[in-house]
Amino acid sequence: MPQSLVKIIVHFVWSTKDRQRIIEPDIDPRLWGYISGIIENYGGRMIEAGGDAYHSHILASIGRIELSQLVGDVKRESSGWIKKQGPQYRNFYWQRGYGAFSVGQSQVVAAVRHYIRNQKQHHQGSTFQDEFRSLCAKYDVYIDERYCWD
């Protein structure tokens, strides 16, 4: 076969450094739009994005790209962009690590998109750490919490 075709749907999760509550609601649409553009530059497509003042969830369809390279570029470029959006963001940083969980096509439309859209309500009664532990358990991913929360 002379052509390589790849479609992988990934649910990405990461927080701001030290879970600092810095992302204001009025910047959300522009931040997700900026991140969407970065993903598109890699030949991918953002399906859904959402989060809270201190973390993000991104559901994206990606092709032949190394995940760590994509996430590194998304975090680096969006961090640089958000710092230019006002003095309140001059100390903005994403955490070093991230979660990346595979999602089946049949799950995309209903469950994961709904989950991401409702992050602000979801986190009225749950912490990022509890949510991340739950996602890791759901996807059967072992986490060493000594290194997870930097």
Image (cartoon, rainbow, N blue to C red):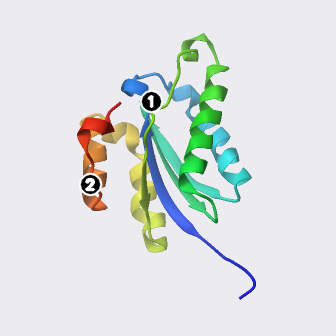
Mark 2 residue type:
Tyr
Q: Which residue in the protein does label 2 denote?
A: 142
Task: Please name the amino acid that badge 1 sits on.
Answer: Thr
Q: Is residue 130 above or below residue 21?
A: below
The image position of residue 59, as x and y in percent, is: 51, 55
Please name the residue shown 25% across and 51% down the image.
Answer: 134
The residue that disc 1 covers is 16
Instruction: Locate residue 43, reporting x and y percent.
Output: 71, 59
The answer to which of 79 and 114 lies nearer the viewer is 79
Q: Please identify the quarter of the rendering in which residue 139 is found.
A: bottom left
Give the image location of residue 12, x and y in percent.
Answer: 47, 50
Alpha-carbon distance for marks 1 and 2?
22 Å
Mark linked to residue 44: none
Q: In this view, does 108 lie above or below 146?
A: below
Does residue 148 lie above or below 111 as drawn?
Answer: above
Viewer-side label of 1, 2: 2
Residue 97 in view in this figure: yes
Among the 4 quarters of the image, the one containing residue 88: top right
Counting residues from the start of the chain, the first of labels 1 and 2 encountered is 1
